[in-house]
Image: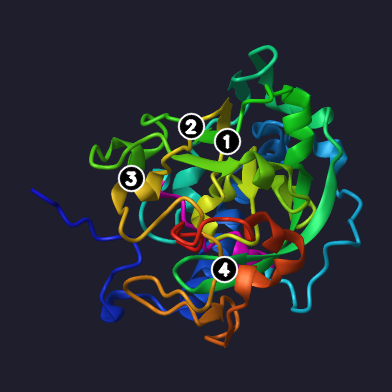
Amino acid sequence: MLIKIRRGWEIPESQATPESAFFNRRSLLAGLGGAALAAALPAGRARAAAPADMAADLYPAKRNPQFTLERDLTDEKVATHYNNFYEFGSSKYVSDAAQKLTIQPWQVKIDGMVEKEMTVDAEDLIRKMPVEERLYRHRCVEAWSMAVPWTGFPLKALVDYAKPASGATYLQMQTFQKPEEAPGQRQFWYPWPYIEGLTMAEAHNDLAFIAIGVYGKPIPKQMGAPLRLATPWKYGFKSVKSIVKFTFTDKRPKNFWQTIGPDEYGFWANVNPAVPHPRWSQASEELIGTGGKRVPTQIYNGYGEFVADLYKDMPKQERLFM
């Protein structure tokens, strides 16, 4: 029997909190909560209670001028509190729930078709990489978008570090699995852990990026700390968060959403305004934080000069956009 699972964004319009109202209310509550905490703790205790941020001395990183934007950056409060992270719930507002995730220590496994399988500490791995800041557009498959300054390193630098075998044609990435910390992972009908993948050609592309920070500081947990993928020419569900494993393989990975809805989500997920999602148009997108402003969607999210050649020789029967 096929069970229809309602996605987190498929709620009646009457039940949705307007974005502006949500952020105004959240600002008030955050202010009250912060004041209460400050009153309850001796001076300096609030800072001392939290562990030091991972690789904190690397921020802010130098900005790479090759990756700029023609639109304003999304307000930091909006971008960091409007997130899809199903491990912590199906709403957009999972930032509080995500704080339960333990990210130190964080071990990363590199395995599969590599010269030598290894497990490395995330901070040690980061310090081996060429860290920089890039401005990227981010386009969700739900037809909203943001523009953010990611800090991180090229994925191809990690690929080179891993030394994959010549026969490896795909890179599979996997999110953590900690149901004791992530309540969404207790929902048995989802195929946990979250899996995503790229071809090796995509992983070597200049745009493919592992984000470790945003807005000049370490990336918050609700956005995928400590390591997340950023592939700005693809829909956001490709950007696997809180990565614990990189597997090099000669078999195409079947990703999380493709497993759930193969008629709606595919392996490629390249942004294309001319190819609608089965249940909504992709011709335009809402810029979150702008009071509902919409703009036309661009092919490959505007990054065609970087990536179009990756797909020029693909068979026509391949579904390259979903």
Q: Earlier in the sequence, mark 1 or mark 2?
A: 1
Q: Amino acid at mark 4?
A: Ser
Q: Earlier in the sequence, mark 3 or mark 2?
A: 2
Quick one: 43 or 48, which is closer to the camera?
48
Q: Earlier in the sequence, mark 3 or mark 1?
A: 1
Residue receiving disc 2: 251
Assess whether mark 2 and mark 1 are in contact (beta carbons under 8 angstroms). Answer: yes
Residue receiving disc 3: 259
Dot 2 crowding, Cα within 10 Å, few <14, some 14–19, many 20+:
few
Spatial CA span between label 2 and label 4: 47 Å
In which quadrant of the rendered image does the C terminus lie? bottom left
Provide the secondary structure element on which disc 3 rests: helix
Assess whether mark 1 and mark 3 are in contact (beta carbons under 8 angstroms). Answer: no
Quick one: 30 or 44, which is closer to the camera?
30
Measuring from the top left, give residue 11's x and y in whole percent. Answer: 28, 70
> For the point 83% across and 62% down, which residue is it?
67
Q: Amino acid at mark 3?
A: Thr
**What's drawn in magenta, residue-wise?**
76-86
| Tag nearer the camera, 4 or 3 | 3
Residue receiving disc 4: 27
111 relative position to 309: left or right: left
> For the point 57% across and 87% down, which residue is it?
293
Dot 1 crowding, Cα within 10 Å, few <14, some 14–19, many 20+:
many
Relative to 302, is 320 above or below? above
Residue receiving disc 1: 170
